[in-house]
Amino acid sequence: MAGFRSPFMKAGVSLLMLFALACGGGSKSPDSTIVPVAEVRLNVSTLSLNVGDAQTLMATVLPANATNSAVTWASSAPEVASVTNGTVTARSQGMATVAVTAEGGKTATCVVTVNGLQTVAAPTFSPAAGAYASAQTVTLSTATTGATICYTTDGSTPTTSSTSFASPIQVSASQTIRAIAVRSGWTNSSVASAAYTISIPNTVAAPTFSPAAGTYASAQTVTLSTATTGATICYTTDGSTPTTSSTSYASPIQV
């Protein structure tokens, strides 16, 4: 038997080699290797926003060459802070946790604090409300930067549809100015009010002379009068300035 050589031995070796090639030569190419996600990070872990504000969070999947770098976003309280593709929008006062999740359940979180709406400072008036003997030019202002002042002058309550303050208000008669200050994303200010009483003294019409001043060839009888009913005329004839203590006109003056 030792000297026996099967006619199939050579063929068997060939079959064995083919089988080895079929089973052992099938390794995957390097390009198809799957790289799993090790972790996901966020650029911040806490965030503070005012109602109406929005800010985008940045997520980083590691390693950078991970085969699947897709992430999903979620908020623990979307009514407080919602999130869409990483953009967090503050909805109402409170706290929420925004989570980003990558392949394999790898997660990073950011605690979002949403502050309540701030209130715009009420308008102030210059000059202040009060009684004046002359017309006034009133300026309105607010300590809140970026706010718009809306006002009325007829005593009605101002709204965002009322006249916007752009230049000083001329007050020539008694009236009340009411105003509010508003700013987007803020609570409107309380209504501020200023009452102005304007009491401008009446001016008596200046006296007139008849006959008029001039050169005459004879003595004249001069009559003084004023268009203001009930007024008293005081006069002098020596060139001095008349006062209320000067002679009161009662009858024509002989000149």
Image (cartoon, rainbow, N blue to C red):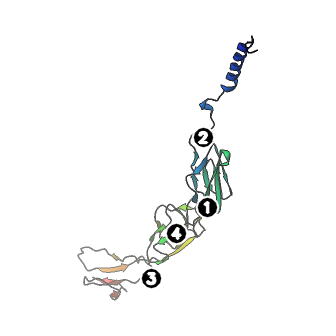
Q: CA distance from mark 2 to mark 4?
A: 58 Å
Mark 1 or mark 3, earlier in chain? 1
Give the class, few, some or many, for how many residues have Cα within 10 Å of label 1's Cα (few <14, many ≥20).
Answer: many
Residue 92 seen from this side? no
Mark 1 or mark 4, earlier in chain? 1
Q: Which residue is mark 4?
A: 123
**Drawn side of residue 21 relative to residue 218, left or right:** right
Give the class, few, some or many, for how many residues have Cα within 10 Å of label 2's Cα (few <14, many ≥20).
Answer: some
What SS does tag 3 mark? loop
Which numbered mark, 1 or 2, is in the foreground of this view?
A: 2
Q: Which residue is mark 2?
A: 66
- Residue contact at pointers 2 and 3, CB within 8 angstroms: no
Q: Quadrant of residue 97?
A: bottom right
Q: Position of residue 162 (x, y in %)?
A: 57, 62
Quarter occupied by the C terminus: bottom left
Which amino acid lies under the numbered mark 4 shown in the image of this protein?
Pro
Q: Position of residue 253 (x, y in %)?
A: 31, 84
Which amino acid lies under the numbered mark 2 shown in the image of this protein?
Ala
- Residue contact at pointers 1 and 4, CB within 8 angstroms: no
Q: CA distance from mark 1 to mark 4?
A: 27 Å
Give the class, few, some or many, for how many residues have Cα within 10 Å of label 3's Cα (few <14, many ≥20).
Answer: few
Which amino acid lies under the numbered mark 3 shown in the image of this protein?
Gly
